[in-house]
Amino acid sequence: WCGLHGKGGIMVTPLSDEAATKRLRTGGEGPPEVAAPLLAAAPAGAVAPAAAAPSAASATAESSPTPTSSIAGGVSTTAGSPGAGVSSVSQQQQQQPSPALESRNNSTVGVGLEGGTIPQELPALKVTFYELLIRQLRDDGFAAEAQSVAQQLHLQHTGHIEKDALFGTYSKSMKWAFAEKPPPGEWIPLECSPVPPLGPQEKVLDLDSLAASGAVTKGAVAAASPITPLPISTLDQQPAVQGLGRRAPEIRLLYTSQHQQSCPCRAAAFSSDGRSCAAGFLDGSIKILDCARMRACAVSTEGPLARMRVTEEELTKPVTRVLHDHVLGITCLAFHPTNPTLFSGSLDKAVKIFDLTRPPGHKRAFSVLQDVHTVRCISIHPCGDFLLVGTAHQAVRYYDLQTLNCFTTFNQSDHHGGGVNDVRCTSDGRLFASGSSDGAIHIWDAVSHRIVNRLPKAHSASAVTSVRWSRNLRYLLSSGADGRHRLWDVRQGREIHCMGFGTRACDWSRAVFCAGERYVASSTSNTRLSDVSLFDAQTGSPVFMKLGMHTLPVHALEASPIDRTLITGCDDHKARYFSVEDRGGG
């Protein structure tokens, strides 16, 4: 290896051990851009320091014991010298050959001035280290010591290393050793506790137990005959999911809500108890729907108890209220975890807070958080006292809902390089993840508001458009503008699955866990798909390429936290509520 310096720090370029040995032994040049002329074999006495001052050096050369010098761990040390004696070398000693250096040319090791050994063939990385050491000694005023080390190793300072290069490298290493955040690229394992705790019969995504039980992995499934994605019209002929012993699920449309003004649906959200959901439209209106009433409508129109005629009033019963206080389209929605309160973000650069206990006639918000950038995403801390907001700006906002004060990290290097497209907090409130247009996923400490880990190019440098935590907080599901959805193990910072269809370029994409985290539902702006796709969460294998319910791109996609239902918002001006049910054997 050979060290090169630029303004940004040290750049190390590879140099083979053979080339490094040639530089030490014969002074041969390396690559043209890092070549450094080397000294020929110096006389043995050139590195022997005198024992006394220059005036008495020749008089005491034979009567006084010769001080010794050795190189240990890359540091030159001198014994028996009062300080300046190292720079005093007698003319007589320079002309006398040294048996130690003569034997060094004929053996694999050389004998140092203290009787220690110096390897003739140093590793390539050590050559770079000694070059840095020699330059640092010169910069600190120890020219004689630097010359001693250079002659001992047959190296010469050539000026291609900047001043204080070794000190700069050492100071950076000490900074990482004692600072709060780790060096770039080093992953800190994350261990979180889901809230509420997992129940004994609760089904969640757990790839560890799947591997321990000897279940078929993704590679084994791919090696066998993989599932062929089928449209929903051929669902009855769908074979069992390979390697998992269950059939593909049944998709049932339960309710459809159409906007009267023919505006696309762009946002959707479920309440924490799963009883209500909300749909936001491009004209700034928000519909609140009752999930139990939507399921009742499905029962009244399907099955053996279905009626032939259902009145329009009965079909609109699930819509409990309509809110309208934004002047531009809705971009994101979120329910408060404990209170009957709804938060909405919009293209009008505002976050508005609605009280759902007011009479249905009240359509206005009772509080507003105004920003100067378009609001793209919101997430409420599980304690309910703080609100995370992502905008077209690179900083994640952190609002105190008691005082409505806004905070952000004081460390500028923690900010994203582009707008924040999605932000999600863990159920225990310790961490939150953010995805940005700069292609990075940042995982933050929710208390200190500092970055814990980061995935700089999570989707091949494409924008990250959505992030979701698994129920046990071991996995993170992300979607990007590359048209792919990736499952990450946050304990190790590695990718587990990569899921997706079609082109690797799109404007946006969404992915959520559904049906007890057994499946991953996804949507993209790809007009050739224009529907929701379904994947197996355990293997990443495709289940359905299209569900057959949408003909235009699906912008909004959210899963219920308590059951197997989904809500979607499409450009066809409709919000759809449907379920993903197992057919048996699962």
Image (cartoon, rainbow, N blue to C red):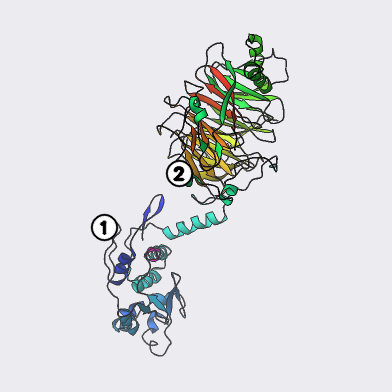
Percent from the top left, x then y, of residue 136?
42, 63
Percent from the top left, x then y, of residue 453?
54, 46
Along the viewing direction, whichever of 457 and 58 lies nearer the viewer: 457
Q: CA distance from mark 2 to mark 1?
A: 53 Å
Q: Which residue is mark 1?
A: 32
Q: Which residues are magenta?
A: 124-129
Left or right of residue 510, residue 473 in this image: right
Q: Amino acid at mark 1?
A: Pro
Secondary structure state at the residue bearing disc 1 = loop
Considering the image in quadrants, where does the C terminus appear? top right
Percent from the top left, x then y, of residue 26?
27, 71
Figure check: 214 above or below 537: below
> Which residue: 52% across, 15% down?
263
Q: Which corner quadrant of the image does residue 386 belong to? A: top right
Q: Which residue is mark 2?
A: 224
Percent from the top left, x then y, of residue 500?
46, 35
Along the viewing direction, whichever of 53 and 542 lies nearer the viewer: 542
Figure check: 381 above or below 172: above
The residue mark sitting in front, 2 or 1, is: 2
Residue 432: which numbered mark, if any? none
Rate crowding at label 1 as few (under 14), some (14 to 19) or many (20 or more) other CA atoms within 10 Å: few
Q: Amino acid at mark 2?
A: Ala
Of the image marks 2 and 1, the number of the one nearer the N terminus: 1
